[in-house]
Amino acid sequence: MSMKTIWWWVIGAVVVAGVAYVGLQQQKPQGEAGAVKIGAILPLTGSNAAHGEFARRGIELAREHLGAQAPHVIYEDNQFDPKLAVSAYQKLHNIDHVQALLILGSPSGMSLSPLVNKDHIPLLGIVAAPPYSSPDDFTYRIVGSSVIEARELTKLVIDTFHPRKIGLLVMNNDYGKGTATAIKKEFATQAKDVSITETAFNPDETDMRSQVQQLKAANPDVVVIAALGKETGIFVKQAATLGLRARFVCAQACENPDLITAGGIAAEGVLMTVPDETADATFTNAYMAKYKEAPNFVSMRMYRATLLFSKVFGQCKTVIGDALQSCLQEKLYASQDQSLFVFDKNGDIDDHFVLRVVHNGAFIPLQQ
């Protein structure tokens, strides 16, 4: 092959590469060029993948709503593992240079809190664990803490079932332990004569017969569960097989299709406390049109969080450098938009919880 022919091959390759690059740039989604960069660390696979998908849907619908003003969102899958959440954050911060963060889950929230505060990266998260609360820093929660939920869950259980004996099943992670601690404190305050038998299990544990037998021996009127949907489903199915007769009430994290899939017919009648979400009509209609089902609180809260980030970045658009992070922090704490979120000095929100129940394979309000 002559030198002239070789040069023509080189020129041709450069031209093709340039055309391909231009094509890729033209295919960028609306709102991406020069947009704010947000990281989203979600459990997109693993035991809580359903909630991760709900979160992603809410974020993406917000981006569609914002159009050209939409932030560029970079997703990382942490499989609901706090160690993977840390690795994902390091990549998002050091390589992608994201300016804000969305997360789901108390384990991730607790592991990332010191990191984002050191780096001054605002974090909005569906995080229930009480220790996540801290004053005047860069962490905010977009769901009521376990302290608020435990207060309302305990009252609902007392008013609905008038129990004398309670069983408490606890998932051995930040979410389960934090929720269980808050629940025990509330029962000690609201119903001192109620006895509690507690048992725990490790994440992803599938054989819960020993926990079932321990609770069965205590003969509780109600079993309160601080766990995810899949593990709750496994437990109630094994409880039915082993003859544990009680009403089952779980905290917000178990409102997940995995509960019904894993529990089967045994999941029928399981109750749960969930945030009382008055959904935005625009969001609800768009969600149902796209996904052919009603949204849950995870999708709605992530939708609102994405809109809030877009709003505060707009308010700080003339601020550059290190001052930007301080501006974002100030605007988030100053937010008084009830349609989005209003934070107290700890980055917490006031929330209200209601009871839902599994009925005919679906989650519905209890009163129905």
Image: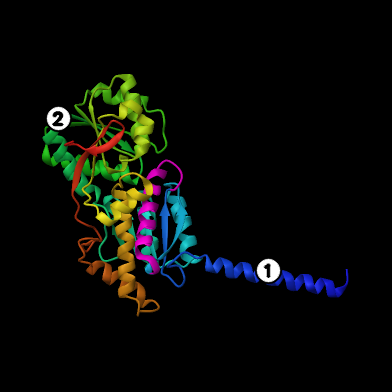
Q: Nearer the viewer, mark 2 or mark 1?
A: 1
Prevalent SS, magenta region: helix
- Residue 324, given in percent of the width and then of the height, sits at 36, 75
228 relative to 321, above or below? above
Q: Residues within 10 Å of mark 1 (few under 14, many from 20)?
A: few
Residue 336 in view (yes/no)? yes
Q: Residues within 10 Å of mark 2 (few under 14, many from 20)?
A: some
Query: Observer-nearest residue: 272 or 224?
Result: 272
Count how many numbered circles sit on residues in the image: 2
Query: Observer-nearest residue: 358 or 126?
Result: 358
**Amino acid, disc 2:** Pro
- Residue 204, given in percent of the width and then of the height, sits at 42, 37
Coloured how?
A: rainbow
- Residue 98, given in percent of the width and then of the height, sits at 44, 66
Name the residue beneath numbered marker 2. Answer: 163
The secondary structure type at the circle numbered 2 is loop
229 relative to 281, above or below? above
For the point 21% across and 46% down, the residue is: 149
The secondary structure type at the circle numbered 1 is helix
Q: Which residues are magenta?
A: 44-68
In the picture, residue 355 is in which quadrant?
top left
For the point 36% across and 43% down, the residue is: 173
Q: Quadrant of the C terminus?
A: top left
Name the residue beneath numbered marker 1. Answer: 16
Q: CA distance from mark 2 to mark 1?
A: 73 Å
**Amino acid, disc 1:** Val
Residue 138 in view (yes/no)? no
Q: Is residue 120 magenta?
A: no
Answer whether labels 2 and 1 touch (C-beta < 8 Å). no
Q: Is residue 29 left or right of residue 356?
A: right
